[in-house]
Structures are given as structure tokens and as C-alpha cells.
Image (cartoon, rainbow, N blue to C red):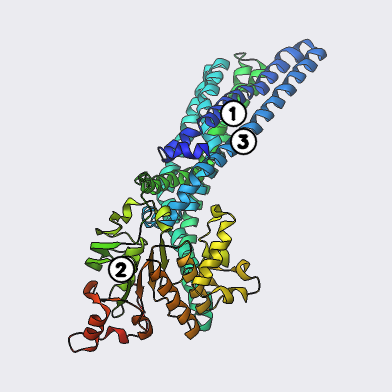
Amino acid sequence: MAAAAKLDTSSTLQAALDACRRHIGFVILFSACLNLLYLAPSIYMLQVYDRVLASGGVLTLVYLSLVLFATLAVLAFLDGTRQRLLLAMSRRLDRLLAPQVLRAALQREGRQAAGQAHILREFDALRAALSGPPALAAVDAPWAPIYVAVCFLIHPWIGTLALLGGAMLVGLALINQRAMHDALKANEEAAGAMYSLQSGDMIQGDTARALGMQGRLVERQMKARAALNDSLSNAGQSNAFYSASTRFARLILQSAALGLGAFLALRQDISAGGIIAASILCARAFAPLELVVGAWRQFEQGRQAYGILERVLRTQEAQRDFTSLPNPQGALSVEGVTVRSPGGERFLLTNVSFKAEPGDVIGVVGASGAGKTTLLRAISGAATPEAGAVRLDGAKMTDWDSERLGRHVGYLPQEVALFAGTIGQNISRFDSAAGEDADASIVAAAKAAGAHEMILALPRGYDTEIGASGRGLSAGQAQRVALARALYGDPVLLALDEPNAHLDSEGEAALLNAIKDASARGVCSIVVAHRIGFLKLANKLMIVNHGRIEAYGPRDAMLARLSGAAGPRPVAVPNEGSRT
């Protein structure tokens, strides 16, 4: 927790990596020791050929073998420790960054910054690159020049062969990088599009089965999957070709080092032990470079993931530390609010302004697509206006921390948007910090919504598990649970979008009582509804048309306007088909 709090001050991907400097430092240190110890087999060969065979000293062979055994044991220990350090660094990054990445994935700005990429999958790709073969290749590759230098000590020709071979392998790695960059980028875009399509279709699986659409949806998904497979094939073929080419070049160079060593030994330029040592050293010099080429796909995926996460987390960095404001009383002021559609091609709301006082019950009416849902999204804080401001007790909603503001706002969207979990968890908004008091508040909210008896009739009551979007409940039951969630914690502002759309007469009576009781407590309620029964409860009505407030005032005056020739009759619209 302390590390996470420390990260909040800078809140960047680089800051998280800086917090792992100790892990990285030890990995580099252990890699240095490892690569030095890798020289042991070469030295052992030199001593065996040049000393043991020449002198016939069995005791010398035993001592050399014991030293080699101890050296290789230390090497194995350091190698395992290095792997564990990389995994520990990966877990630390998860603790530091995963909450911010997940928060960004829930916010519109974060999703826009990620584009088609899935944010959490990109984060896992980065962690895999930092703890897998790419990381090992990165820390071992700088030691290749050391092995080349040792080759020069054996003989300049051996060193020249190792230097030219290493340069050739580096050239192959650079060509591989260029060849795979575009292929991997296309692969990420295709994967994001396919998984988004599949996720959306799965949510509507029951509807697809009822309408006989499953075959056509599978066909559509297979087309997206074909595009993904094509991009995977292109990237895989490129990587396979260059990996095979690198392996071929390494084996040729290693054999060439052995042959060159034999030639030099015949000329008496090096000893017989130098033949084997040259081969081993050249192989060790080329091995990290081959590993770089083999791991380049993960390398490139990690690099692209870093860029995506940097953009995504930048949306979190822009958020400031909010000053704690006093609890609001429910005075609402909407000032010149303008909201664009997600694509930005049209306005959903244009210069909307009005005021409401604590205890007001405002009915919002208008034709489908008039902008009522968008108005409630802006009022509740679910959507951020492009221009203008929504104020609660004089403070702009953007001046509130969203977590603290949410405690004072009850929002019931047009789609009830319940989450996978228990009914109690959904009502309490998954507030695990409330402790034992949460149970009493959950029951109180359910009673206020008239849903308590309905919930008790379920198999496990408040502990009944439901699926995403309220699966396992009827539409009316889900709406009553969502109303209880909106009432949880005694909010001072209610924004209810067609809260009676799926309710029977008993449920609607409970809804009217809940709104009446909330108004008596001083709660300001903004409700989109089309049934006359609710309009009689409202003390003010608002007529929305084409993204503007056409009229707003006392209920009786607005009803007279709706029923007269002066205006349309939007109240006759049976339901709200549009989500704008």
C-alpha cells in the first residue's frame, strides 16, 4: 500500500519501472556473474587439454572437475534467482499499476487512448516481456562483446570471426524488427477488433438464439478471426524465417570457429585446448544474439504495449488531487451543457440550462432520441460535457472526486447495468469498506425501493448470485434491484432513466412511494418517464426536443402545454428506444 501511495505522486509507467530499480539492478548484477561463470567450461577445456593430457595428472583433473562442478552449481543458482527476481518485479508492477490500468479501462478517456487494443491484455504483454525471454536477452546481449574480446585473446583470427559473426546476427535482428513491426501492429488491431466483437455477441447470445442469428454471428466472427489469423501468420512466418536464419548462421559460425581453431592449432598458433575453447566462446557470444531474434516478437509486443499503456495512463495523470468538499444538499444547476456523440459527428445536447432545488421531482419528457438519456448521463456524472457545467450545491461535478461524488448520487440508467455478483453486492455498489453497517444500508435501500420482499423470495435472498447485466433476474426484478442501488446510502440527487419501463403495477407503486419519500427527505429527483401516473407525482416538468430544453416549469403549466395545440405530445411515446 505504501508503494502504491508513493506511485500516486507521479503516476506514470516510468515511475513504476523506477520503483523496480532494485530488482533490475540485482538482475543485471546476477547476469554479470552468470556470464563470467559461463567462461568456466572454456577454461576447463583449456586446462584439460593443455595440462591434464600433457602431464597425465589425475589429481589435477579431479580438482579441476570439482571446481567446475561448484562453478556450474553457483551458475544454476544465480540463473534461478534471476528468474525469480524478474517474476517478483512483474508482481510488483502489477501491484503498482494494475489498479490504475483497470480504472483507465473503465473510463472513456482510457478506452479512447487504447484504441482497439485491450488495455489489460497489453499490460500483461508488457509484464511478460519484462519477465520472460526478451528481458533475459536484453541483459545477456551486452556481454557478447566480452566474449568476442576473449576470443581475440585466444587468437586475432578467432576474434575477427566472432566479431563479424556477431555483426551479421545483429543485422539479422534489425531486419527482423523492421519486418515484424507492421505485422505485429496489424495483429494487435485485428485481435482487439475480434475480441470486442466476440464479447459483444456473447452478451446478446440468448437474443441471437431466439432470432436465429447464431449462424450469421459465427460467420461474422469467423471473418474477423480470419483477419486475425492472417496477421498472426504474417508475423509468425517472418519471425520463423529470421529465427531459422539466425540459428543457421550461428551453427555455421560455431562450426567455422571450430574449423579455424583446428587450422590454427595445426599451424601451432594455438594449443589443442584452444580449439574447443574457441568453439565454446563463439557459441556463447552468439547465443544472446540468437535469443534476441527468437524473442523479438515478444520484444516488439512489449514495446507496443509500453506505448499504449503510456498513453492510457496519461489520462490518469491528468486527474488532480481533489479538495474534499462538504456534503451537498441537492441544489442542482445545469449551465450551458453541450454533449457530443461518441464519434463527435453530432450534438446530443446543445446549451442546456436549468435549476432544481432539494425536494424537487422533475419529470423529463420528449420524443425518442430527443436527448433525455444524455441529459441524465450528464447530470449524474456518467458523461462529461464538452462545454458548460453541472453543479451540485454550486460546485462543479468535475471538481469532485468521482468516488466521493458517487455516494451522493443515485443513478438508474436506461439499461439497468447490474454486475456479476450477489444482489447485496450490487445494491451496495460493491462497497466492501462499509463493514457490518453495509447490511443494514442494503436492506434499507431495498425496502425504500419496495424490493425487500421480492429479494427475500429468491433462492438465497440478498446472497443470490446473478450474472452480468442481471442475468438470472427478470427485467422487472433487475430494475427494482437497480433502483435499490440508486437509493443506497441516501443520495441527495436521483437521476432515473425510465425506472418504470419494466415494472408491474406493484413495482410502479413502490417506485412512486420511493420517489415521494426521497422528495420528503429533500432529495432532488430527475426522472425520465412516460406514464401519466408518474407525471402526477412530479412538481416540475421538462420538455426536451432535439437536444434542447423546449420548456421547463411547474407541472400543471407544462401539462397544459403538452395537451394544448401549442406543442407536440411527446408524453404519448410508449417507450424510449434510443440511447441518446
**Tag 3, which secondary structure?**
helix
Q: Amino acid at mark 3?
A: Gln
Q: Residues within 10 Å of mark 2 (few under 14, many from 20)?
A: many
Residue 577 lies, in percent from the top left, at 36, 79
Q: Which residue is pictured at 34% across the width and 81% down the height? A: 535
Of the image marks 1 and 2, the number of the one nearer the N terminus: 1
> In the rendered picture of this protein, how many numbered marks are placed on residues?
3
Of the image marks 3 and 2, the number of the one nearer the N terminus: 3
Position of 13 with respect to 350 (left or right) is right
Residue 372 lies, in percent from the top left, at 31, 73
Q: Quadrant of the C terminus?
A: bottom left
Return the mark for residue 555.
Answer: none
Which residue sits furthest front?
520
Q: Which residue is pictured at 66% across the width and 21% down the height? A: 40
User: Would you name the residue on which mark 3 appears?
Assistant: 83
Considering only vertical position in the picture, is 552 above or below 70? below
Considering only vertical position in the picture, is 570 above or below 325? below
Q: Amino acid at mark 1?
A: Arg
Q: Decide which of 441, 546 is in the foreground and name it.
A: 441
Q: Nearer the viewer, mark 1 or mark 2?
A: 2
3D distance between C-alphas at marks 1 and 2: 67 Å
User: Would you name the residue on which mark 2 appears?
Assistant: 375
**Tag 2, which secondary structure?**
helix
Q: Decide which of 1, 59 is in the foreground and name it.
A: 1
Q: Nearer the viewer, mark 3 or mark 2?
A: 2
Residue 23 lies, in percent from the top left, at 55, 31
Which residue sits furthest top?
55
3D distance between C-alphas at marks 3 and 1: 19 Å
User: Would you name the residue on which mark 1 appears?
Assistant: 284
Can you tell which quarter of the image residue 437 is in?
Answer: bottom right
